[in-house]
Image (tube, rainbow, N blue to C red):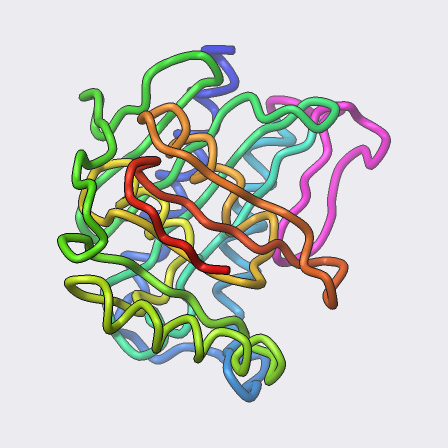
Amino acid sequence: MINYLKTAVEAARAAGVLLKQNFGQALDVNSFEAHDIKLDLDVRSQDLITGILLDRYPDHAIYGEEGIAGNADSPYQWIVDPIDGTVNYFYGIPHFCISIALRKEGQMLLGVILDPMRNELWEVVAGGPALLNGQPIHVSTRAKLSDAVLSVGFAKAKSTIDAGLPLFEKMVYRARKCRLMGSAALDLAYVATGRLDAYIESAVSLWDIAAGQLLVEAAGGKCEAKPHPEHADKIAILASNGIIDLNVD
């Protein structure tokens, strides 16, 4: 397992160098969408990560935001988000990350999240501690929602935005503060580190949360993830320190 982790860290750091070098520069845009942007750099970052992973493990599969590569029949599947927070990145907001996870036959084995702008590297192996730059981390111990800082994410479709607005209104009155950060993987890393007390989003993709979910649980928190009732490829997630009562129903 340690070799898998080292490879994931190597791939994340290589992508981090690429993203940091291009941050704040003129960027090639593949498409502008209603609530999203697709950059050529997303593809380049994933290609870089894919090349490193498949060079070491050519029989593995890669499943990421920019497509599928490798051996689709492999029990080992790397789950990659090459830029989580692409809109932030495009607008010069230094809040984005690279997320890499590995699962075998549906079981998550490890996760790595890198914020290249702050040089913060989160890593976790199933059954092991959650680490930030090599040091153990733990979720917050805040028990009252009125003391909590939450991140509420909004997906890109009108239906998911419409569903998220009432939740945000409910939470913004009850919590100390609500944030919309723009990077699901970093939200989960922040929950694991105790910077945020919870992260809620009704429709995210697997690559957004694969590494972060494992990280939160290893840090003593709780994650509830379930398929979205209307979008088969999306997941509803509620991650928290496991103490506060969010009562989102």
- The magenta region covers 56-76
Identify the residue at horizontal 43%, vertical 40% (top origin): 212
On whether residue 178 falls in the magenta region, the answer is: no
On whether residue 70 falls in the magenta region, the answer is: yes
Give x and y (percent) for residue 149: 20, 56
Identify the residue at horizontal 65%, vertical 31% (top origin): 54
Q: Which of 50 and 179 is in front in this view?
A: 179
> Farthest residue toward the right?
73
Q: Nearer the viewer, residue 18 or 228?
A: 228
Residue 228 image-quadrant placement: bottom right
Give x and y (percent) for residue 119: 20, 42
Give x and y (percent) for residue 186: 33, 50
Identify the residue at horizontal 50%, vertical 78% (top origin): 37
Identify the residue at horizontal 36%, vertical 28% (top origin): 123
Compared with 92, 99 (above or below) is above
Residue 77 image-quadrant placement: top right
Residue 130 image-quadrant placement: top left
Compared with 134, 221 (above or below) is below
Q: Nearer the viewer, residue 198 or 32?
A: 198
Tell me if 123 is positioned left or right of 150 in this view: right
Q: Nearer the viewer, residue 15 or 176?
A: 176
Give x and y (percent) for residue 110: 50, 24
Compared with 30, 242 (above or below) is above
Q: How many marks?
A: 0
Compared with 192, 236 (above or below) is below
